Image (cartoon, rainbow, N blue to C red):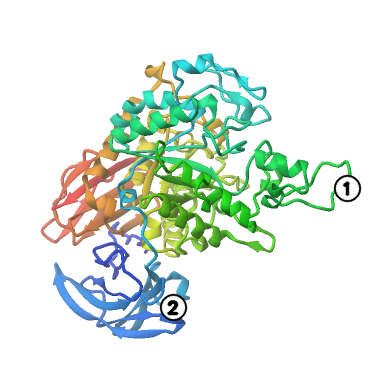
Amino acid sequence: MSLLPHHDGSAPPLLPHHDGSALYVPEQEPALGDTVDVFVRVPAGANVRQVHVRTTGDGEPRFAEAAVDRTDGGDVWWRVPVEARNPVSNYRFMLTGSRGYRWLNAAGVVSHDVPDNGDFKLVTHAPPPAWARDAVIYQVFPDRFARSAAADGRDLPDWAIPCDWDTPVIGRGPETPRQFYGGDLDGVTERLDHLDRLGVNTVYLTPIFPARSNHRYDAASFDTVDPLLGGDAALARLADAVRARGWRLLGDITSNHTGDAHEWFTRAASDVSAPERELYYFDEATGCGREPSYESWNGVRSLPKLNWGSAELRRRFATADDSLLRRWLRPPYGLDGWRVDVANMTGRRGADAYTHEVAALLREVVADTRADGLLMAEHGHDHTGDLDRGGWHGTMNYVGFTDPVWSWLRHGDDPVPNFLGTPGGVRRRDADAVLATMNTYRSLISWRSYTHSWQLLGSHDSARIRTVVGDAARQEVAAGLLATMPGTPVIFAGDELGLTGANGEGSRTPMPWHRPESWDASTFAAYRALIALRRAEPALRHGGLRWLHADADTLVFLREAPTGAVLVLARRAAGDPIRLTGLRPAENLHGGAPALRPDPDGTTTLPSDGPTFQTWRLT
């Protein structure tokens, strides 16, 4: 819900609240047919005399009356059982007071009737692996991360433009995918101590298969690791080193397309009777002697699109015992899961609509191969229709986190391109619009999908956060939100050093290991402290989310769990003091502000300086 401040800087009384966290839904993994208790917190003075839950099991609305379970600190907690009747069961609350009823759904409290797609959701599909909720992920773009000594002895392919580690990255143009810096997997292994100092516990590698580009999203094979990265043995060494630290290792797979040099495609393009022909979309009306016409990603001919209507593709990619999806999840590599490139387009082409079917198939195969495997979708825009279907465990949350944070904290007047290149770039917005954007996307998926999605401030496909926000102080605010909001934090290698980049290709900056004097030490210290904070506070990993205040320059929220609560203040600029009621005393955890002590009238005043990021543990 969006809370706008009163004229005196104080927040209005808190509204009734529910989310899908354990504080409100103690049974987090219901089975189909289970009946579970759900709770609503109604603050004192909220004018609620009666609470009903509305469910739509098997498509038919039903109402059940809630009962008062307890009173705690003036808040009344109402309890009501809900049946997980369907794989995804919707529910919302009807709050009746002296002036009629209001609805409480996943978007908040509203006084008008609303459709069911914004309801809370109980999900009975098998849950994501337990380790994912505690993950802090570090994204590595292998060509630009680190070179081992062995890299110097490798022959370069004909497509590559050799570059020294300090050669400037070309952000646009035909040479962009051909710049070759020679980072490899043994180089990653040699730099794991840096990741350990930072505090992350999961490594995510962008593609590692042979290709004809530095990004390797145009795979020429799925059967081996690129020899330029050290080959299969180097991946096994990295996997062993990651596991020895108790961490996880994720790979990156392209389910929407291959490269045009892929052995499947070269056979299909050269022989109309080849079994590989059905793996792609060819225009069979192509005349004799003409280049074959085929569907490709966004019209880029080097990326021919896969046809998921093909049973043979499903077998080779997923279901066969020796499929590419299974092979790399097994020893000696033992990847802990996959990030799926262009998941939003996978299986979609004209009248073909296989996306949800394919997502469920891939998830089934991953779980069958290793029970704790993760399957994460790339999705750059509205992902809400593709989750909670027994497929992707979550998504890369560009629209519900990255873009809103950018629009709030961006600096200057120069256009900042967002992930999908919207004309005009990222608009500058105040916090109320940012909060509305976040809540809109969050409210259309289950709490489970939201908390297992990746929150990120940038990636190899976007500008870097330092370029967007302009300075270390605002970057710390952004990193603070990354570390304290629900979801899995993902850090693009180099952001913790203050590296810059104006677009996706330009952000793929080689790590300046040999120039430590260029590192932003204060930014590294902030990231390290914020990651440590998240790992130390269960509420930041498993707690709910309750917004307390939003004005143009300020966001305030609580992360609450049965084990405790953390208060978060994010300011992009200095402003008027914020006065809140109903808070317990709190000790500062990050940011250096004084402890919070309510005044005799019960009012707590938060700091007014900025930019600043502060957190407190409520006692």
Nearer to the camera, 190 or 54: 190
* Rendered image quadrant of residue 572: top left
On the rendered image, what quadrant is the N terminus found in?
bottom left
| Between discs 1 and 2, the one toward the N terminus | 2
Q: Residue furthest left?
A: 600
x and y, in percent, of residue 59 in the image: 46, 81
Q: For numbered disc 2, what is the local secondary structure?
A: loop
x and y, in percent, of residue 199 in the image: 29, 35
Q: Which mark is residue 287?
A: 1
Decide if residue 87 is on the left or right side of residue 212. left
Question: Is residue 312 visible to us here?
Answer: yes
Nearer to the camera, 210 or 417: 210
Q: Amino acid at mark 2?
A: His
Q: Alpha carbon of mark 1 to alpha carbon of mark 2: how far?
A: 60 Å
Residue name at image x 25 percent, y 39 percent: 532
Question: Is residue 575 visible to us here?
Answer: no
Between disc 1 and disc 2, the foreground one is 1
Q: Is residue 381 above or below residue 290?
A: below
x and y, in percent, of residue 212 in the image: 63, 31
Residue name at image x 20 percent, y 61 percent: 581
Nearer to the camera, 211 or 277: 277
Residue name at image x 64 percent, y 50 percent: 306
Q: For numbered disc 1, what is the local secondary structure?
A: loop
Q: Which mark is residue 112?
A: 2
Label 1–label 2 contact, CB within 8 A:
no
Q: Is residue 109 above or below residue 348?
A: below
Q: Residue furthest front?
A: 321
Decide if residue 65 is on the left or right side of residue 335. left
